[in-house]
Image (spheres, rainbow, N blue to C red):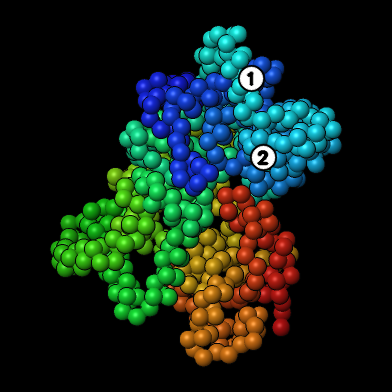
Amino acid sequence: MEQTLPKMFKKVAEQYGDIAAQYYHGPDGNFLSVSYKEAFQNSLDFGAGLLAMGIKRGDRIGLISDNRREWLQADMGLLSIGAIDVPRGSDAMSVDLSYILSFSECETVIVENPQQMRKILALKNDLPLIKTLISFDAPNSTDTKQSLDAGITLISFADVLEKGKQWRTINAGAVEAELEKGSWDDIAGIIFTSGTTGTPKGVMISHGNFLTQLDELPERIFLNPGERALVVLPVWHVFERLCEYVILIQAAALCYSKPVGSVLLSDFQKINPQLIPAVPRVFEAVYDGIYRKMRKTGGLAYVLFNFFVNVSKLHCKIDRKLFRKTARFSHDYLLLWWPVLVLPWLILYPLRLLGGAVVFKKIRAMLGKNFRAGISGGGAYPQAIDEFFWAVGVNIVEGYGLTETSPVVSVRPIPHPVFGTVGSAIRGVNVRIVGEHGDVLPAGKKGVLQVQGETVMKGYYKRPDLTAKVMTADGWLDTGDIAMLTVNNEIKLLGRQKDTIVLRGGENIEPLPIEQKLQESRYINTAVVVGSSGGEDMRYLAALILPSEEDVKSYAKENGIVFQSYDDLLKNPAILKMFESEISSLVGPKNGFKLFERVSKFTFLKKPFEVGRELSAKQEIMRFKISELYKKEIASMYAEK
C-alpha cells in the first residue's frame, strides 16, 4: 500500500495514464474527459504553484467548493507538498466559514467562484490571517480590485497552474521530491463535522486513515479500469471523498453530476455508469419519483406495477431467508425452513421474472446500460426503500461510518449483500457492542458501537479535551450509535444514543425506526418524533409531520373533499382522520412496535426542511435545532386540555 494519497494517485497515473480519470460537463452539456496523466500533472503543477507562492509543509489551506474536476487536482496538489486541506462546500454559512477558517488558521483559501470570494471578503474582519484567495472560476477585474482593496491577493486556478509549470522548469524535480517526503501519519485534512449537536469539531484525518480503507473496499465496491461512477455529493464530506478514492485506486473515472432529478437521470443515460455513491435521500427521491409517476399513470399499469412489486418483495424475502442473505442474530434452523419455503419460492420465481421483464426492466433502464450498484451512506437507509430496490433488481449497498473513522467502518459487499445490515467491519477495523455498564455484549444484544483501528482519527484539532471524551481508556472510539451484531459480525444500526427519547415512565425509545416507518406513507414527506417539551420528559410520543402537499390534495380530490386553500385542507376533519389512521396503522403492533412507541399526537408543518436550518450539510435532521425552531408547536402537543 502506498504511504500517501498523492503517491497512490501517482501510481495509478503511471499505470493507466491514458485512461479517463474525470468526466465533466462541457459548454454544450456533453461530457468532456481528463486523463489520469493530465490530472496528475495538473496536481503537480498546482502543488508547484503553491510552493512558488510560499506555501510550505503543514500549512492549512481552506478549500471552499462543490465537487468539480479542479477540486481533486487542487487537493492532490496541496497534499503533494505536505499542506493540509480544510474543506467545506459552497453552501457553507458565513458563521461556519468564519469559525472554521479562523480556528484552523488558514492564510490561503481556495474558492469555487467569485461568489465564494465575496463571502470570504465579507468576513475579512473575522479572518485577519487570510492573505491569498485562489478561485477555480476566473475572477474579473472588479473581483480582483475588490480583493486588493481588502488587502488580499486574488489569483485564478489556471494562473496557479501556469505559475507552477514555470517553477517546475526552473526547479526540476522539486515538487516530486516534496511528494516523496510524505508519510503515512501526515495529516491530510481537517474536516469539520457538520454540527448536528452544535459547534463544529475539526477532525484530523491522516493519509494512513484514508489509505487503510483502500485495502479491502475495492473487493466490496469493485470497478475495472476505465469504468465509470457518477459523483453527485459534496466532496468536502468525508463519505464522498473516500468513495472517490475507492474509484481512483481502481483506475475508474469520476463523472461529475448533480443530485437533481432531471440532471442526474440525463447523465445516467449519457455516461452509463457502473456505480453511484449517494446519501439515502437521493435514492428516496428516485423511489418517490417512480411511485408518483405510476400513480399518475393509474389504471391497469398501476395495478400490475403494485402486483409485481409485492410478488417480488415476497419472493426476495423468502430468498433471503433460504440463502442467508438477511441479518441473523441466533441459529436459524435452516433445515427446518427449507421444506416450508422452497415451494413458495419456486411458485413465485416465474412471476418475479415476468415482473422483471414487463415492469422492472424499464426502471433499471433509467440507470443506464451498465449499472452495477449504488452505495448509500451519510445517513440511515430506510428499510422500505431497501426492500423496493432489492425487489426490482437494483443493488443498493448500505455503508456506515463517521467523520471520526475517516469514514468507513463497514459496507455491504456488492456481490454478497446481507439485508438489514451495513455489512461487517472492513479489514483493519475492529468493532464491539458495549452495554451500559461497559460490558462487551454478544451477537443479538443491543448496545453502543465502539470502533478501533487504523481508520480512527488522530483527534479533534486543538481540542484534546473533546478527543478524550470520545476515546475509551483502552483505546476504542465511542461512536454514540446504538447497534447490535449478527452471528456473522455484520452490524445492524438502531439509532443514535443522543437521540434516544426517555418517556416519563422510563421507557427508552429510538425515534429513527418510527420516523422511517411514518415516511413510508405517500402522504408524509418528513416526520420528526419527539417525547419532551421544554426539557421535560412526557408520557407519550408526538410527531412533527411535513405532509406531501401533492398527495394530500390528490386524496382530497379522490374523496370529494372541497377546500379553498391548502392550509384549510390540513384543518379538515377528514384529512386529520386520514392521517390519524395512517399513523396508527404504520406504527402499531402489526409492524413490530410496542404500545408505548405509538404516536399519540401530531402537528403539521408547512415548510420543507432546509440545509443549515433544520438539516445538516449531509441532510441529517439536527434535532437540537428542531427543538428550538419548533418549540411552540411541540409545546402545543403536550398542553393540558
How many other residues sit within 10 Å of disc 1, few (<14), some (14-19) or many (≥20)? some
Where's residue 71, x and y in %? 57, 34
Cα separation, mark 2 vs mark 1, equals 20 Å
Q: Is residue 306 above or below residue 373?
A: below
- 506 vs 245, left or right, is right
For label 2, the SS is loop
- 80 vs 54, left or right, is left
* Res 350 visible: yes
Where's residue 641, x and y in %? 71, 83
| Displayed quadrant of residue 154 | top right
Compare residues 487 and 519 and report the one nearer the observer: 519
Where's residue 557, x and y in %? 51, 86
- Residue at mark 1: 163
How many other residues sit within 10 Å of disc 2, few (<14), some (14-19) or many (≥20)? some
| Displayed quadrant of residue 637 | bottom right
Under mark 1, the amino acid is: Lys
For label 1, the SS is helix
| Displayed quadrant of residue 1 | top left
Q: Is residue 329 above or below residue 548?
A: above
Under mark 2, the amino acid is: Asn
At x 43%, y 29%, the residue is: 35
At x 53%, y 65%, the residue is: 515
At x 29%, y 46%, the residue is: 416
- Residue at mark 2: 113
